[in-house]
Amino acid sequence: MTVEANKFALLIEYTGKKFHGSQYQEGVLTVQQELERALAILFGQPLRAIFSGRTDSGVSARGQVVHVVLPEGRQALSQSEIFDLTWRLNGIVIKEMSITAIANVPSEFHARFSAVEREYVYRILNRSQRSTLLKDTHYFVRQPLDLKAMRSAASSLLGRHDFASFKSSNSDNSSTICTVRRAELLNLREGELEFWIAADHFVYNMVRIIVGTLIDIGLGKRGVEAVEQALASHDRLLTGPTAPPWGLTLNAVRYPDHFQLFQNDTGLTIEELRE
């Protein structure tokens, strides 16, 4: 596939604690603002970063994807330029963000509209005492949770459903129909839980409302059938509270295979190229 000479994509990760979300907002620090500041320094002019999707204040990302279009006349970045640009950007952005890969992309690539799946993970610490080390990445729930009930309820999310009940009231009017490929609750070690969910589309605050509902089920405040009932009713009142943002991470954004995103001509990732 022919790449557009002046278009490239970046794979970035960031911790959400210091940022007021990913998208630009006047007067506060956002991921977009910080990335565009670094790009302007390197290229000597303002450049717009287009994100695969928004993340809220406090939400982290391991695999956020961004595309940037340079002025006409630029040549496609060579592998040495990609490696150099990655290092130089990481030398400018604040320590709460890093660029892990850069790739040339074809003209039809769009970070948001070309995506076919997004994957999130929500982390919960379920034990009697809080953790200093995990306080910024896990939602602490002191009361015991019924993991069997939570897993049973989560399985109802799989497939194609209307997630209107799991949408914040202040969200936009985009479609609430989503196809969920993965909805899995893992107990990695004593009390450290991870809820993984992957879908072709998410509505605003969907993952955090799902987690809040599953926690209610785990605490016995709602029955296992609560998720099925909420999906059928389209009623936000039948779902649980919105879980706090610091437990949520955008883990990956996936694109059709033909884009071969973040691979060089030999099929190696940037990290493999470095080695």
Image (cartoon, rainbow, N blue to C red):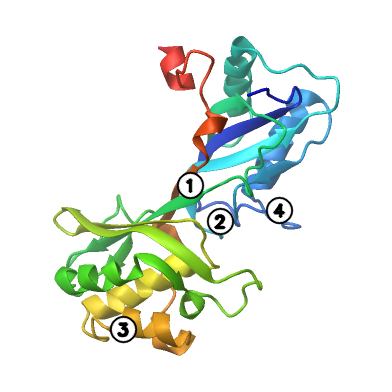
Q: Amino acid at mark 4?
A: Tyr
Quadrant showing the C terminus: top left
Residue located beneath label 3 in the image: 226
Question: Closest to the observer: 115 or 251?
Answer: 115
Residue that numbered label 1 is attached to:
61
Distance CA(mark 4)–CA(mark 3): 36 Å
User: Residue 259 — which label?
Assistant: none
Q: Amino acid at mark 3?
A: Ala
Residue wearing tag 2: 55
State which tag comes first along the sequence, 3 or 2: 2
Q: Pointers 2 and 4 in contact (CB under 8 A)? A: no
Q: Are marks 1 and 2 in contact (CB under 8 Å)?
A: yes
Q: Position of residue 207 (x, y in %)?
A: 43, 65
Q: Secondary structure at mark 1?
A: strand
- Quadrant showing the N terminus: top right
Q: Earlier in the sequence, mark 4 or mark 3?
A: 4
Q: Is residue 51 above or below residue 184?
A: above
Residue at 62% from the left image edge and 40% from the top image edge: 66
Q: Residue at x 26, y 57 (%)?
A: 131
